Amino acid sequence: MTEALEKTNRINLLLDFYEPLLTEKQQTVLRYYYHDNYSLGEISDLFEISRQAVFEHLKRAEQTLEDCESKLGLVEKHQARREALDALRRELEHVPGLRERLEPMLERIEQAE
């Protein structure tokens, strides 16, 4: 995976958890840039601000998301739970019939996240 794609995936994951903690403008700029693939120029035209101002809005919003994650760790905990569930599913494949019996419980655990 390229570095840009990894960053996009990380920001989108952080947005899933922390978007309500951002200002409306930060949410909008991040959504346009990372969800909708708008360029800095397109966003600057929409907001009637310079491309540099859009860039600075993005950087501040990204930093806010990273600060939230460093304090709360919700994304890290989410990823650890997913990895544990995946490992459990792999182990259950070795016991005939057990995975089928436990799968509804595993799905409820996933949905509770």
Image: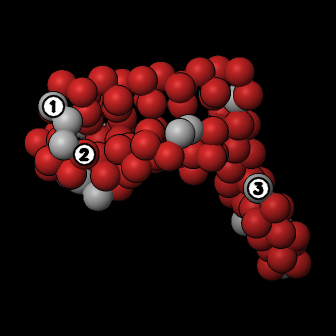
Q: Position of residue 109 (x, y in %)?
A: 83, 61
Residue pointed to by mark 2: 47
Instruction: Please determine whether, in this image, residue 6 is positioned above or below residue 39.
Output: above
Give the camera-side residue of 11 and 38: 38
Residue 6, percent across and down?
A: 35, 37
Relative to 44, is 20 on the left or the right?
right
| Residue type, label 2 | Phe
Secondary structure found at label 2: helix
Sort mark 2 into few (<14), some (14-19) or many (20+) by Cα contacts within 10 Å: some
Quadrant of the frame with the N terminus: top left
Callout count: 3
16 w.r.t. 106: above or below: above
**Rendered residue at 14%/47% (across/down):** 45
Q: Which residue is mark 3?
A: 113
**Type of amino acid at the residue the image marks with label 1:** Ser
Q: Is residue 85 above or below residue 111?
A: above
Indicate which disc residue 1 carries. Answer: none
Q: Amino acid at mark 3?
A: Glu
Q: What is the distance, in whole Å, between disc 3 and disc 2 at their CAs?
A: 35 Å
Q: Which residue is mark 1?
A: 50
> From the viewer's perspective, is 45 left or right of 2?
left
